[in-house]
Image: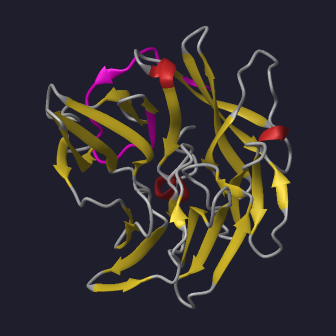
Amino acid sequence: MTIWIERARVGRPDSAAVLAVVAGNRAWVYSPEYGLLSPRGLSRGAGYELIFGENSLSPDGRFLSYEEHHRNGFFERVDQVRYDVAAGAAEVGERWPHFEDGASSVRMRHVVDTGTHPTRTIYELRDGSCARTLPIEDLCHSNWTGSPLQFSPDRRRIAVSAQAGPGEQCVVVLDLDTDEVRRYPGVMLASSGAWNPDTGRLLVAEVSSADSFALDLVTGERAPVRSRIHYDGRGHFPSVIGWLTARTVLFYRAIPSIRRIKIASFDLDTGVESQLLELPMTAGAMSLLGVFMAPRLFLQNPSLLD
């Protein structure tokens, strides 16, 4: 049975959002209890421009993260903002991007060695009162499909969409216990829920084709995902959101002609597609950046959209 939402309304969930829809400088959140919601108080008013990216929804669904740009004459101030979706309150955070998952977080600091662009990234892990610099310096690379840095479900590893050199995109996986680093060239994280619950596979996008694959972290082999999902032949290509269970992925199709976003699951073992949720493409959603999930919530309850 497909859950059909006619329109978004202003409001906020009781505790967390399971999905976020991001388009241009706007964002909406979805809660099974309240439907699609347009949060209040994201911006401080006129003159402030909001820039959403891949780190839009936190893994636990409690926060939206974005940049707030304010131009005053020749000067532009950029703040990193974290918005509590349940409280409806925004706060300015650290200048540098950071990625939280429970008590653990990674703070990133870009370093400029030559010229005007950053050439490497310093990653600092904070776990409770402890902090240490991680043994990777690959430049974190944005890909507009999901958070470019994600903790594994057991929080023992992180995966980073990175750029090791000019045109050398890769996924870097770091074991936080042993400091072992493995690089997988030619791919980037393909979704906001890239880690499989079994922690042995990642959803990645091939740089050369943008197609989605399940990457085996032991063998390095890639199994096709997006190309196996039915294409309707009308330009409505499926976009992967993340793992729903160890064998099923969540994906969406944006259909501008009817202004709807259809969300479904796909079983990689059986090839069965199941429609779950249909959302409106609200004003501004024609510039859709993506649909992002809160992977921690789906890890606890894969049936959130049933």
Image quadrant where one finds the N terminus? top right
Residue 7 lies in the magenta stretch:
yes
Residues 196 and 204: in front is: 204
Image point (69%, 54%), residue name: 204
Q: Residue shown at 39%/50% (left/top)?
A: 61
Work out whether residue 241 or residue 3 is closer to the camera in this orientation and state it.
Answer: 241
Q: Would residue 280 be visible to someone looking at this image?
A: no
- Would you say residue 92 is visible in this rendering? yes
Front-lying residue, 220 or 225 = 220
Give the image quarter of residue 94. bottom left
Name above or below for residue 168 compared with residue 254: below
In the shown orientation, is residue 132 left or right of residue 120?
Answer: left
User: Which residue is most to the bottom?
Assistant: 178
Left or right of 135 on screen, residue 268: right
**In the rendering, at what x and y percent does residue 291 appear?**
52, 36
Q: Residue at x 44, y 60 (%)?
A: 115
In the image, taking residue 296 as reference, residue 81 lies left or right, namely left
Query: Which one is in front, 199 or 148?
Result: 148
Magenta span: 2-21
Q: Main secondary structure of the magenta part?
A: loop
Residue 225 position within the rendered picture, expressed as x and y whole percent measured from the top left = 79, 46
Whether 122 is drawn above or below 93: the answer is: below
Who's the residue at 29% across and 81% down the image? 128
Indicate the quadrant where residue 247 lies.
bottom right
Position of residue 174 measured from the top left corner of the image (x, y, whole percent): 58, 78
Give the percent coordinates (x, y) of residue 212. 74, 47
Marker count (numbered): 0
Magenta-drawn stretch contains 206:
no
Which residue is outermost to the front? 115
From this view, report whether residue 150 is shown above or below residue 47: below
